[in-house]
Amino acid sequence: MTRINLLPYREERRKAKRQQFYALFGMVSVLSCLIVFAVYTVIDGYVEAQNAKNVYLKSKIAVLDKEIDEIKRLKDQIQALLARKQIIESLQQDRAEAVLLLSELTKQMPEGVYIRSLKQEGTKIVLLGYAQSNARVSTLMRNIEASQWLENPQLMEIKAVTVENKRLSDFNMNVAIKRTSSQEASKK
């Protein structure tokens, strides 16, 4: 007797292949999901690390900006202090200059010349006074020319006047103060 297999073997084979396909598809899906998750986790780790570096750099930049502002403030204070120092030095020099000027004027003043007004504007001095004669004004100018502190006398005006029944010469003269190069450098 011949045996006839009534079982649908093709159907079972298809069913087995289908199960095998679904199992393989499931494993590939799970594996691809794991790969995507792993890649996403690695990239997220890189992004987190870069964000942490950015936050660190921003905090350091903020600290450096504060230090730069502090340096600018200190530079401004230094400039202000240097300006004050220079002003004080010029005042110290000018204080001694007035004494030297008056001392030098008394040394160079010939007899018969009287100063009634003295005005200083920087290095320029305006002298107003009386002299017994024009020759005495000329002597004053020569004495100023020979002085080590005064220079460049310029007679602006001279005229004859009568004061208390005396005939005098009323004069107006400009004189300059000699400054050494170190004094001029400290003025600037």
Image (cartoon, rainbow, N blue to C red):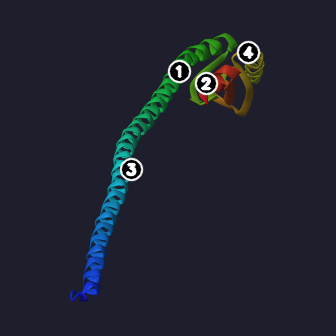
Residue displayed at 44% across by 37% down? 72
First in sequence, mark 3 or 1: give its number: 3
Image quadrant occupied by the N terminus:
bottom left
Is 47 or 15 nearer to us in this picture?
A: 15
Is 30 or 110 nearer to us in this picture?
A: 30
Q: Amino acid at mark 3?
A: Gln
Residue occupied by mark 1 = 89
Please provide percent x and percent y for residue 29: 30, 69
First in sequence, mark 2 or 1: give its number: 1
**Mark-to-mark CA distance, 2 and 1:** 8 Å
Name the front one of labels 4 and 2. Answer: 2
Q: Does 152 sit left or right of 121 as displayed?
A: right
**Mark-to-mark CA distance, 4 and 1:** 25 Å
Q: Amino acid at mark 4?
A: Ser
Residue displayed at 37% across by 56% down? 43
First in sequence, mark 3 or 2: give its number: 3
Image quadrant occupied by the C terminus:
top right
Please provide percent x and percent y for residue 124: 64, 30
- Label disc, if present, on residue 186 of the rendered structure: 2
Q: Secondary structure at mark 1?
A: helix
In which image quadrant can residue 157 be found? Answer: top right
Name the front one of labels 3 and 4. Answer: 3
Q: Amino acid at mark 1?
A: Glu
Residue occupied by mark 3 = 50
Q: Amino acid at mark 2?
A: Ser
**Mark-to-mark CA distance, 3 and 2:** 56 Å
